Amino acid sequence: MRSLTDAVCQTRAQLEAGADWDIIVIGAGITGAGIARVAAQRGYRTLLLDRGDLAGGTSNFSSKMVHGGLRYLGQGHFRLTRQAARARERLRQRWPDIITPLPYYLMHHRGRGPGPLAMRLVLWIYYRISGAKPFHRPRWLTPEQLAARLPGLNLADNLGANHYFDAVCDDSHLVLRTLEEAVAQGADLSHYTEVTALRRNEQGQINGVDIACGERRCQLTAPMVINATGVWADGLTPLPEGLMMRPLRGSHLVFDQRDLPLTASLTLFHPRDKRVVFCYPWAGTSVLGTTDLDHLADKNAPARCSAEEREYLLELLPLLGLNHTPPILSSWSGLRPIVTPQPKAGEKQAPSDASREHLIWDEPGLVNVTGGKLTTFVEMAEEVMASAESQGRLPEPQPQPDIILTQRPHLDGSAIGNSLTPRHELVHWARHGAIHQLSDLLLRRTRLGWVLGEGLRAYQDEIQQLCQPALPWDDSRWQQEWQHYWHHFQQYHQE
Ligand SMILES: Cc1cc2nc3c(=O)[nH]c(=O)nc-3n(C[C@H](O)[C@H](O)[C@H](O)COP(=O)(O)OP(=O)(O)OC[C@H]3O[C@@H](n4cnc5c(N)ncnc54)[C@H](O)[C@@H]3O)c2cc1C
């Protein structure tokens, strides 16, 4: 099976040789990865490009929930919730090692948020429309039952909790697995390759792209280009008239699980504005998030958690029985690609009320897609491909059998620090994960950077020793990589 490293090396050689493709997909987040997989499976010669790392955009900074979106149901978006809840079930069946069910306890406090009975009704509707297993039907937990299920927390006086199920994943692993399958189906892949412009033929129709890969510039032609660049989609082509991109930032704080011991996700109504915020176990840590606010800074610079967002999230700790702030290991912030109508003068919609639905728009030779959710990426990819095929510019499809890659055989090996990353997993990604720089390995192929924070420094020498045979960097390059890594990490983590 071709690894990601092999695929990137082979693709670079093909780019040098002036090869051509049927479809060029721009953006290796979950949206572009899903499209590349479907396109390759249909037998199209497919090339996927990203200007940064694989899964380096929003798809690695999400809340990592594979869910129908209870909140959307509450807002009356029945279709979106139903579609996403069913997509969650399909993803769980396809990749049970990546998408895992997680119990959620929706805690109720007197005078805060909707009442327990109303929520019980909403949860029943949610359960019924998702087609989930009977075992996952919602239940009621008294305060005593809730406390017994979360023995490490000293929960403040609450009315009890509605207990339901959703699923959680590692978002960048979801992208990587999708890419591995795309590559296994024959897709080509080049990261750190920026599309600098779309190319047009004499009739003004899109017929390729200009790219920059390191010092190299070249032009590629293809009958179909797909722009799946998320929050940056309007950088390559304008949105349809009357619409605008409204980047909404969401931030998360990461704690050591020993400081905030959780076996389930707690769904809380924020005391300040009654927004739903989650506190959940992830990759051996406990995560608190997310916020939802307009990102007014440059969207091309790394987004990070502001002091104001940190304060907002920390206000939830007393509800979890904590009257002090444990050390924050790391924090991440992502930009939601939200497309909204241009507001009329004086009109202002609250960020959390803005629709998360995706948008597809096209012109001859080009299909654009933005918005949506991780959870619905397969359905979005199919819609995009239907739109591309309907233009009649692609050759006859030659569908191949679907390739589903499952978990790699689990070798014995202890995990690094308090992370859940075994040493052999780190080495596997170093060798096969198309690593261009150390932060690819430590922030996206593994999650050691987020999970250990500054504690990673204690493992620097060991990581270097383990990975040096797989990554052909000499000692001075390693030193540079470490410096660059810490700079990169700080850019995300601090304000
Ligand atoms: C805080 C937050 C929480 C979320 N939580 C959830 C959740 O729990 N569940 C859920 O289902 N969804 C969630 N979402 C939504 C979900 O994360 C996004 O909808 C999804 O990740 C968007 O993926 P994408 O591939 O479209 O964009 P991205 O992942 O951003 O990918 C776009 C890619 O395009 C590349 N690119 C841009 N310009 C160029 C160019 N010129 N040339 C080459 N490449 C380019 C970028 O480098 C990037 O890698 C959340 C989003 C946020 C922000």
Image (tube, rainbow, N blue to C red):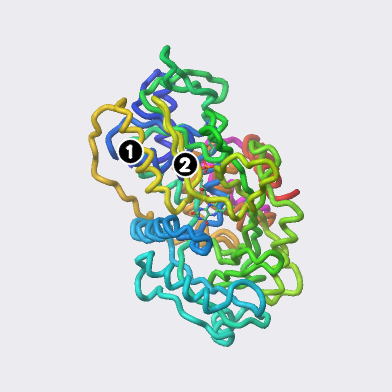
The x, y position of residue 256, in whole percent, is: 64, 65
Highlighted magenta segment, given as a residue range: 456-475
> 63 or 179: nearer the eye?
63
Which one is earlier in the sequence, the residue at label 2 or at label 1? Answer: 2
Q: Disc 2 beta carbon < 8 A from ligand 1?
A: no
Q: Secondary structure at mark 1?
A: helix
Q: Quadrant of residue 341?
A: top right
Q: Residue at x 61, y 58 (%)?
A: 451
Residue at the farthest bottom position: 144
The vertical placement of 289 against 16, above or below, is below
- Tell me the distance, in whole angstroms, between the alpha carbons under discs 2 and 1: 14 Å
The x, y position of residue 66, in whole percent, is: 46, 58
> 426 or 74: nearer the eye?
74
List the residue tagged with mark 1.
386
Magenta span: chief secondary structure: helix
* Drawn side of residue 75 relative to residue 89, left or right: right
Dot 2, crowdedness within 10 Å: few (<14), some or many (≥20)? some
The x, y position of residue 3, in whole percent, is: 39, 41
Whether residue 458 appears in magenta in the rendering, the answer is: yes
Q: Amino acid at mark 1?
A: Ala
> 408 or 411: nearer the eye?
408
Q: Amino acid at mark 2?
A: Leu
Instruction: Work out whether residue 411 can be spotted.
Output: no
List the residue tagged with mark 2.
359
